[in-house]
Image (cartoon, grey):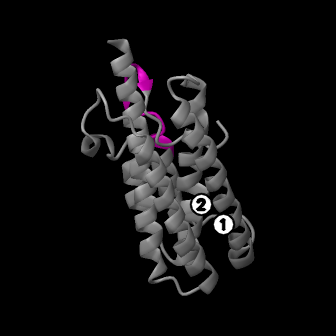
Amino acid sequence: MAGVVGLERAARTIGAWCWAERRCFELLGGWVHDTPEPALKALFARHSRHHAWRAERWAEILPRAYVPPVDELIAAGPGAEAFDLAGTVGPSARRLVAHYDVVYPAVVSAYESSPAGMHPVTDGPALRAIRIIVGDARHDLEEAASVRQRLIGGTSEPTELVHLREAVASSQVSEVVEGMPIPLFRRWGS
């Protein structure tokens, strides 16, 4: 029976990641319409589609046997309120910082930390997806850093983003299944 519980934990983790990528797709896609800067508008539009692609990759490998229905698995994980908070940030330059410096690096860090608890045989599809998705996500983060440097320079952070950083930090380990956290966010570099 332990294998079933382990499978459910893996399914819930991948489901939460799928949800996170879908939510990022919605956020960035929604920002495209009222972003006046052409470079940011193009970045948000392009990366919104990248988030949709990553969500589909997670959905493809989602275990479907011996676990709750997919509708229950692709659900907000701990820290979902940070995505809602990111959606309230404006103007567009602050949105760039909110997504690419606060929220999404923590999501990518969760992906990167997961292989330590995975087995190459039973978790092979997830491990492969993590390698591909992390590479793709890191490329987007690097591109956004370049755009941010050109548009807003330096690394100063608007004070309105402090609450978003706190929301991400406070939710990094909050839901536990089978004695292990379901990581939606991880501290960048941890």
The amino acid on which the numbered mark 1 sits, given as a three-letter code, is Ala
Which residue matches tag 1? 144
Which residue matches tag 2? 100
Looking at the picture, tell me which residue is in the foreground, 29 or 97: 29
Looking at the picture, tell me which residue is in the foreground, 21 or 124: 124
Work out which quarter of the rendered image holds the C terminus and state it: top right
Label 1 to label 2: alpha-carbon separation: 7 Å
**Magenta-colored span:** 169-180
Q: Which of the labelled discs sits on residue 186, or is there none?
A: none
Residue 178 in the image: above or below residue 112: above
Q: Position of residue 25 (x, y in %)?
A: 45, 64
Q: Is tag 1's residue or tag 2's residue first in the polypeptide sequence?
A: 2
User: Does the magenta portion include 177?
Assistant: yes
Q: Position of residue 74 (x, y in %)?
A: 33, 45
| Callouts 1 and 2 close, C-beta under 8 Å | yes
Identify the secondary structure beneath mark 2: helix
Q: Residue 78, can we see it?
A: no
For disc 2, the neighbor class at 10 Å (few under 14, some 14 to 19, many from 20) is: some
Work out which quarter of the rendered image holds the N terminus and state it: top left
Identify the secondary structure beneath mark 1: helix
The amino acid on which the numbered mark 2 sits, given as a three-letter code, is Tyr
Q: Which residue is drawn at the image coordinates 46% and 33% (left, top)?
A: 173
Residue 133 in the image: above or below residue 101: above
Looking at the picture, tell me which residue is in the foreground, 150 or 133: 133
Q: Position of residue 79 (x, y in %)?
A: 41, 46
Q: Is residue 155 left or right of residue 92?
A: right
Residue 103 in the image: above or below residue 3: below
Q: Residue 182, can we see it?
A: yes
User: Does the magenta portion include 139?
Assistant: no
